[in-house]
Amino acid sequence: MTDELPGTSLKAIGIVRNEIKHPLKQDWEKVVSDIVVDSSLTEALDGIEEFSHLIVLYWMHRVATTGRLPTKVHPKGRQELPLVGLFATRSPQRPNPVGVATVRLLERRDNILRVEGLDAIDGTPVIDIKPYLPGYDSVANAKVAPWVTKH
Amino acid sequence: MTDELPGTSLKAIGIVRNEIKHPLKQDWEKVVSDIVVDSSLTEALDGIEEFSHLIVLYWMHRVATTGRLPTKVHPKGRQELPLVGLFATRSPQRPNPVGVATVRLLERRDNILRVEGLDAIDGTPVIDIKPYLPGYDSVANAKVAPWVTKH
């Protein structure tokens, strides 16, 4: 479908530990997870406790990466929602199954970050952690497709 | 430093085209870029024009991935700012040099997305495009480290 980028094998910098063994359809907001960062990287977390929120990038390892990827999907797997291009959705089935979640940092203890709202199951490899910077990451009055707010 | 994840070679789904040949220190907000998506994925963009903002994941291909990574850095390369862990910063030098940018979508024409505010140089491989969902991606009253707002 597209070219593989040479030299882009990802490294797991940590792993998600929580009670969630199978993906939820929703209600991730209150899920508490520990991100256990590789102990060689403990110092690389210094100062992160000064931020209330983090952006976590993770590898959706349970998503099949073989076989033909659909180019269009029903958002949230709901058949009554319109069929739209996969890049117009947050479907985990994507050419590169990398999830991006904005989470609340509850506590840091050494190499372990306790966070709230991470929508990843137990055992998910974490590939990056960034501080959430409102001036850069936040948008006022963003417009979304009508299906996003359909109940 | 950390384990390589098997099967995680990334695919370029598109490429950044703009006038910026060398990274800027700041002032990316008004930079206009075209993301030229692989033409096999044109349909996967259908419906994206209903969103005002997108989250773009890109591979920071110019960052050296060999050699020893610093665990602590001066944010923004400014020596007067405190030395903090790399995960407390947005430094491009990270175990997985994946950038995350929230950008304004100005126009879609077939497989080309014209966006504003993408902090990536010309030729940067794009690995994912997601719709920006305020209820999921936006945080009110996020706290940041004091150095973030230091001029």
Image (tube, coloured by chain):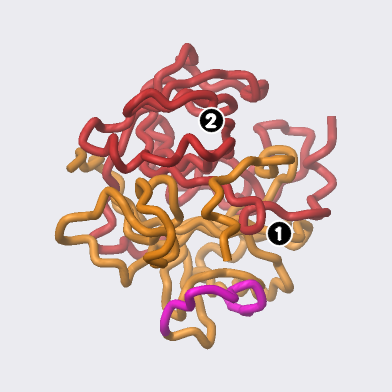
Chain colours: A red, B orange
Quadrant housing the N terminus of chain B: top left
Secondary structure at numbered mark 1:
strand
Query: Looking at the rendered structure, which numbered label has been put on residue B104?
Result: none
Give the residue displayed 72% in from the left and 40% down from the top.
Answer: B141
Residue B138 in the image, given as x and y percentages of width and height: 69, 44
Residue B31 in the image, given as x and y percentages of width and height: 61, 79
Give the residue displayed 60% in from the left and 55% down from the top.
Answer: B55
Do the residues marked 2 and 1 share a common chain? no
Q: Does A100 sit above or below residue B46?
A: above
| Span of residues in magenta | B22-34
**Residue for badge 2:** A105
User: Which amino acid, mark 1?
Assistant: His
Res A140 → quadrant: bottom right
**Residue for badge 1:** B53
**Magenta region's main secondary structure?**
loop
Q: Does A2 sit above or below residue A84?
A: below
User: Which amino acid, mark 2?
Assistant: Leu
Residue B148 in the image, given as x and y percentages of width and height: 55, 55
Q: Does B119 sit above or below residue A102?
A: below
Q: Camera-side residue: B131 or B149? A: B149
Q: Is residue B11 visible?
A: no
Decide: few, some or many residues near mark 2? Use Cα within 10 Å; few <14, some 14-19, many ≥20.
Answer: many
Q: Is residue A77 visible?
A: yes
Q: Camera-side residue: A60 or B143? A: B143
Q: Name the outermost residue toward the left.
A: B67
